[in-house]
Amino acid sequence: MTGEHSLIAAISAHVERCIGKIAFVIHEIESDAVHIDVHYVPARKARSFDLLVTSGMSQRPMTTPPEASEWRHAELVALLPPGWPLHSAAHAWPVHMLRDLAHFPHRSKTWLGCGHTIADAEHPPRPYAPGTRLTSVFLHHSPMLPERFTSMQGPDGKKISFLTVVPLYEQELQVKLRYGTAALLARLAARGINDIIDPKRQSAVIEVGDGDGPPDGGARARRGGPWRLPDSIH
């Protein structure tokens, strides 16, 4: 299967217009409902991180509820430290993570949107790679990227959103599920943790429990389980 050329061209132009020059594209060899390529944008003087951006996830609409129809088409983004060795098998897991996430809503007839968390279905959850304990992700519009990058109009007029994938520790995921997005973001900010992936970063949460309630004035979110990924995540 090959990607939709007009869609890939439009996404590439949007990335280069808003972020920077695409250095290379990591093509998916085998695909099913959609064909997911991953575009690599290296760091530059004005932006101290590399960028990965998918193309192909938005080729088909996700299965959204009526009130979330604007999220039917999306692509995913990951922020990496400059010079991340993507060509090393041991360090290519962010590419696999993005691809698995991009296929997930189409395989499972669901959707991904801003504020969603997605976790491995295994108990205990498996880390994304050796050498890290990150096991789940949070999706949002990263404040580290230009606001004009967060969405674009596709070739057929559809709105495409770009969601940044932020890997989390299990304790951080539980704070988000118990107390909501504001509580999670407050804890990450208090520890100086941004959206750039760091496999060995400190956790923003020591334990979920006493002292881990929502910040003053924060709204408590509805309790519920995380979005579950199939066993293909690793």
Image (spheres, helix red, strand yellow):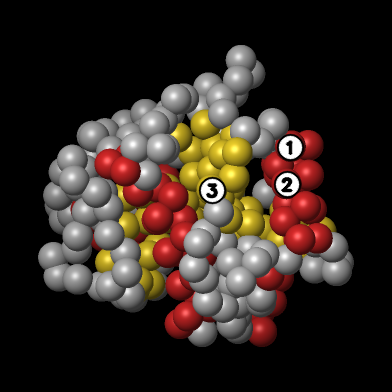
Mark nearer the N terminus (2 vs 3): 2
Horizontal arrangement in the rendering, residue 207 relative to residue 223 (left or right): left
Residue density around tag 2, few if under 14, some if 14–19, many if 20 or more, within 10 Å: some
Q: Position of residue 46 (x, y in %)?
A: 63, 18
Q: Position of residue 76 (x, y in %)?
A: 55, 55
Identity of the amino acid at label 1? Answer: Glu
Relative to residue 183, is residue 220 depicted above or below?
below
Identity of the amino acid at label 2? Answer: Ser
User: In this rendering, which labeled residue sits more in front, label 1 or label 3?
Assistant: 3
- Secondary structure beneath dot 1 equals helix
Identity of the amino acid at label 3? Answer: Ile
Quarter of the image where one finds residue 223: bottom left
Q: Which residue is mark 3?
A: 26
Whether pointer 2 and pointer 3 mark residues with C-beta atoms closer than 8 Å, the reply is: no
Disc number for residue 205: none
User: In this rendering, which labeled residue sits more in front, label 2 or label 3?
Assistant: 3
Quarter of the image where one finds residue 228: bottom left
Name the residue located 73 percent from the left edge and 52 percent from the top edge: 11
For the residue pair 127 and 136, the one nearer the viewer reads as 127
Name the residue located 60 percent from the left edge and 20 percent from the top edge: 44
Mark nearer the N terminus (1 vs 3): 1
Disc number for residue 16: 1
Q: Which residue is mark 2?
A: 12
